[in-house]
Amino acid sequence: MTQRSDHLLETTVRAAHVLLTLDNFDEAVNTALSIIGEGIGCDFAIVLENVYESSSPFPEICNFIYEWASPSFPLLSKTFGATVLPVGLLGIEFLEKYLLKGNGFGGLLEVWNEPFRSLLASVQIQSAYAVPIRVNGEWWGTLCLDYCRSPIQVSSAEISVLMTIADCIGSAIQQNRLKHEHQQTSQQRVADLEGYNRMLQGRDRLLEVTARAANVLLTLDNIDVAIDSALTVLIEGIGCDRLEILENVYEASSLMPIRYLSTAHKCLDSRFEISSFNIESATAIELEDLFQKYFLEMDGFGGVLAEWDEPLRSWLATLQIQSTYAVPIRVNGHWWGILCFDYCHAPIQFSPGEVAVLRTIADCLGSAIQRNLTQRERDRLFKATAKAANVLLTLEDFDQAVNAALQFIGEGTDCDCVVVLENRFESSSPLPNSCEFIYEWAAPGFLPISVAFGSTSLPADLLGLDFMRQYFLEGDGFGGLTEVWDEPLRSALASVQVQSTYAVPIRVNGQWWGALSLDYYRAPIQVSTAEISVLMAIADCIGSAIQRDRTQKTMLQAEQTRVTELAQANTALKQSLDTFAADSDLDRFIGNTLKAIAQQFDSPLIEYWVYSQSEEPASVHLTYWQGQVLSAANASILNVTSSGLIPFLDIPLSVGDSNIGALSIYLLAHRHFPGQTIELAHALAQQLTLALELTRLAQEAQQTALLQERTRMAQEIHDTLAQAFGGILMQLQAAQYFAVSQPEKAQSHLLVAQKIAQEGLAEARRSVWTLYLETTEYEDLAQAIAKFIEQTPSDPSVSINLTIDGIPYRLHPDPGLNLLRIAQESLTNALRHAHAQRVQIYLSYCPQTLQLTIQDDGCGFDPQSSTAGFGLLGMQQRAARMGASWHLVSRPSEGTTITVTLSNPVIP
């Protein structure tokens, strides 16, 4: 955000420089718009001039007098097809609130009112901003910035900079006017214009000084040198007697400072030098209401001494001030301090445009301060993180490494207490019963928090189970001022004078192991999201160190055992896989798997249960009993012989969320098995699940292929016989209608019906033949569609046209057939259901793509509503089957357009 603000300010400086230095006014404005547009990344930058036709304060129209568009876009006036914008599109109330009396308006497309919103949408504008251009204090026109490629949100601070740009343009316009009027007026008028010109020169000088000061603040790395140099440029260029930067000093979480410190100051005349710049606490409290009004809620205040309210007026008089201007300095969106311009020799009046420039200077100062603070905090935090990570990764003594790391973290973050808490579990719940203080560091002069609490553990009830689950088991921690924590922990923290605290989870091997906590006693510290991310990295380092320590100890104790068990597990898994690869009989594979598991556990009995998809209870399918694999029918004797066995382990066989079966293992007596043996049993069960699922998928694939062939035949019947019968019925109805009054016409319809019947029969035969071999009937798609149009009966008033773009080429019969069927179905729907009067079919032949478009002017429909009939579904399925895209556009009363695009259609 800071970089974006700095970039916008730099763009403003460049645009202001062009407006102030180029003699040719049109060239200056066009160049400035280009700099602004390219600098802030918008797509259109426009200057609109108001045109008045009466005494109304509102214009009748706005003329596009200067325009800039990014290289990929034409000028907006050409897109609109007009060089004027009727103000009725915006509304009088809108103009009065935001442009005549306000400071502009803007945002995403949806914040604009109709009908202007629709106008913006018609040219693909996603966000737009407009600020007024004032000339000599009067609303002259508008500066507009539009974004088409993406919806950009512009902050209030950036809007202030845009207002400064508009003021620059207004100054340039006024200066240009003065130049022309100077040549046409009388000597008295010339004198008046010279006065105005001096005023504009003063404003120009202010802008130039601002540009120089901003350049210093944006380029110098040393913040102290940058601010001192910038104040020198400002006080010498602006001509004020004294400049001060006052920094707020806060107490606790109050929004209002309790006193103000002079961070920097400059004075040109020693007579106005002040020995002490501090505004003491008592004075600050007395001025609290005024400062809240002018600086916390507004953008500053200024003027001659008489315009300031008491008691601030009397306090300023003690400093020999005749006029002063003060604007807030904001850092990271918060009120940081005040920038003051004092005039002691004479009372100087600033125009609103000049005050806006002062705000720009304050924004530059805020950006420089924020950049410096951020860099310092990050450098210190990253340095502490690097040192902590280094000791955690290099020191062999784990306790020594963690304690050293906590000290680095505490000193680097300037917190007062750093704690590592380890979870203690007393059940199978994923949430701990308590958290133990196992490592602590406290700053000099502070007690460890366990001593302050009087306990070495933190009960789970103090945090709350829902809180721990949300922020530590499933989240990445929690923190902030004491008041954001829930009771009863909030009161517990307050009881030991903790003002803010932050805690992030420590995870070991992916599991929540404990927490890293940072506590602040001396002040309520707000930690940024970026700093929280660094704390999470430290917690990860601690978790890695804990895991490394655990792993080293475990590896030393169990390496030999693990090697033996892995060898046994690999042998069992390999045997199982070899069995499945060599013998596809599923029951034999299941039996071998049961035997392998029985060998691992020395189990006399293992049952394989099958879970039905219906509501019927589960049943035993196969049973391993003392070396034999028995079917369900042969295992009935086990109800007696297996009595006395101990159920040991049930392993579910699951695919996704579905449970397809289970393995039940029984033992002769209670025994303990290592985790690796249990894991091996699960691995063998997973192999069994895979075999079952592969068998089921193979069966489903056969059914799916059968269903696809049945669906394809249904489509063929629908697209041939059904359409032919429909056409015959229409012709017979027409013949019946004309049978008495116009026998010849009736005879004509009968002949057409006969021809359709013949063609339908031929199409049915061709459909049957396509089941066995390829045919060349559909290679010439254009001729096939033209022939179908000729045979399609329709009212003489209905227009059906075929337009071919490109040189037709041969198609493979399958896509040719499918494209013809889609065209037939679309044309039939347009005539029969949409009652279209005009149908246009387009065939576009390109080397890489073939596109078929059917467009009608019929009644249309809502594609989102459910539609009866097989036609649309059939078209989509045909397109999908040949790998083409199918797109439908339709609205009620606006017709329907269907587009099918086939890639790589040429026969190789």
Image (tube, grey):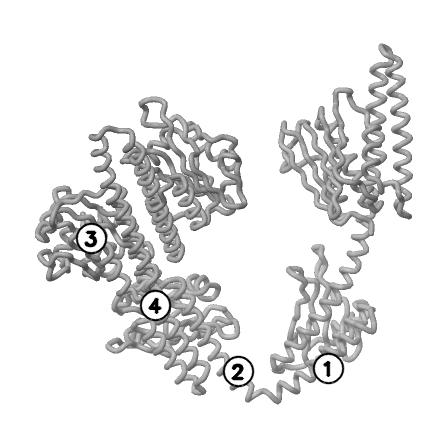
Residue that mark 2 sits on: 551
- Spatial CA distance of label 1 from label 2 is 26 Å
Is 512 rendered above or below residue 564? above
Between label 3 and label 2, give the one nearer the viewer: 3
Under circle 4, the secondary element is: helix
**Dot 3, how many residues are within 10 Å of its Cα: few (below 14), some (14-19), or many (20+)?**
many
Identified by mark 2, the residue type is Thr
Q: Please give the label number shown on residue 571.
A: 1
The residue indicated by pointer 4 is 377
Q: Which mark is residue 340?
A: 3
Task: Check disc 1 and give the amino acid type.
Answer: Thr
Q: Earlier in the sequence, mark 3 or mark 2?
A: 3
Q: Residues within 10 Å of mark 4 (few under 14, many from 20)?
A: some
> Which residue is drawn at the image coordinates 66% and 70% (left, top)?
651
Q: CA distance from mark 3 to mark 1?
A: 83 Å
Residue under the image location 30 percent in, 57 percent down: 366
The quarter of the image holding the N terminus is bottom left
Quadrant housing residue 102: top left
In contact (CB < 8 Å): disc 1 and disc 2: no
How far apart are the alpha carbons under marks 3 and 2?
63 Å
**Point 15% across, 42% down: residue:** 307
Can residue 54 be seen by looking at this rendering? yes
- Residue 722 on image: x %, y %: 83, 33
Q: Amino acid at mark 4?
A: Glu
Asked if the residues shown at circle 4 and circle 1 are in contact, with their CB atoms under 8 angstroms apart, the answer is: no
Residue 669, percent from left and from top: 65, 82
Q: CA distance from mark 4 to mark 2?
A: 35 Å
Q: Amino acid at mark 3?
A: Cys
Q: Which numbered mark, 3 or 1, is in the foreground of this view?
A: 3
Q: Nearer the viewer, mark 3 or mark 4?
A: 3
Q: Are marks 4 and 2 in contact (CB under 8 Å)?
A: no
